[in-house]
Image (cartoon, rainbow, N blue to C red):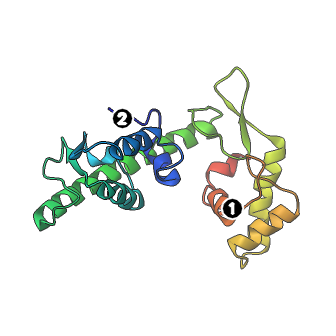
């Protein structure tokens, strides 16, 4: 039995196969030295949760001539081309993705609401806040607060600027992300999209 202990589906998607999926790498190593007909899994979402990772998993298994046997999707095969099976398995994968997104959205709303009330519901702490030591509550981080406010100030002053231009300006002024790295357009957009969350700063 091979397991990827403690790895969330989201992280697996972002890091693909090589970085954190030690169990998957051990399985591939085993397949390279043994004749195996198929890999057994509860459902395909245990192996991938994005189309990109799905393609990579299929590629690696086909390299060793191995198929997948899913307990919850008994008709699944990476080799079969039956249109009905393709439709059913595709719908099941879409349903799984929908359920994960719904759960993530609910958790995010709960954490945002609790943060605005000064509480902390776990997870990553947003830029502008920090966890008060020994307590389950968020407090404003004075240094990061200035960075967050500067993001919104720049947006108001230069509404026609691209997200990349905003990031470059922040970096030039010496502002950094939560982890002390340079800003990119992704971080800038993440802050701007959470305007309601930051209304308490």
Mark 1 vs 2, N-terminal side: 2
Residue located beneath label 2 in the image = 2
Q: Is residue 87 above or below residue 180?
A: below
Residue 4 coordinates in the image, percent (x, y): 43, 37
Say which mark, if any, is on residue 67: none
Residue occupying image coordinates x 29% and y 58%: 62
141 left or right, relative to 46? right
Q: CA distance from mark 1 to mark 2?
A: 39 Å
Q: Secondary structure at mark 1?
A: helix
Residue annotated with mark 1: 188
Which image quarter: residue 156? Answer: bottom right
Residue 94: x and y, percent? 29, 57
Element at label 2: loop
Q: Neighbour class for label 1 at 10 Å: few (<14), some, many (≥20)? A: many
In the displayed image of the protein, which residue is found farthest to the top?
134
Mark 1, mark 2: which one is toward the viewer? 2
The N terminus, quarter of image:
top left
Q: Do callouts 1 and 2 mark residues in contact (Cβ within 8 Å)?
A: no
x 18%, y 41%: residue: 71
Residue 107 in the image, given as x and y percentages of width and height: 47, 41
């Amino acid at each position: 039995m091979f397991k990827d202990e403690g790895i969330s589906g989201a992280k697996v998607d972002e890091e693909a196969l090589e970085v954190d999926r030690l169990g998957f790498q051990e399985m591939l190593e085993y397949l390279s030295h043994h004749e195996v007909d198929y890999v057994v899994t509860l459902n395909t979402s245990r192996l991938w949760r994005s189309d990109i990772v799905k393609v990579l998993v299929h590629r690696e298994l086909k390299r060793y001539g191995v198929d997948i046997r899913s307990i919850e999707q008994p008709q699944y095969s990476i080799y079969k081309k039956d249109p009905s099976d393709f439709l059913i398995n595709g719908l099941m994968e879409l349903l799984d993705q929908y359920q994960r997104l719904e759960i993530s959205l609910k958790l995010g709303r709960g954490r945002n609401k609790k943060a605005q009330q000064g509480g902390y519901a776990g997870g990553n702490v947003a830029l502008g806040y920090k966890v008060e030591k020994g307590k389950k509550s968020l407090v404003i981080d004075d240094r990061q607060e200035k960075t967050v406010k500067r993001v919104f100030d720049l947006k108001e002053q230069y509404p026609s600027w691209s997200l990349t231009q905003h990031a470059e300006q922040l970096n030039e002024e010496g502002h950094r992300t939560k982890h002390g790295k340079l800003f990119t357009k992704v971080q800038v957009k993440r802050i701007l999209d959470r305007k309601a969350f930051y209304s308490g700063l």
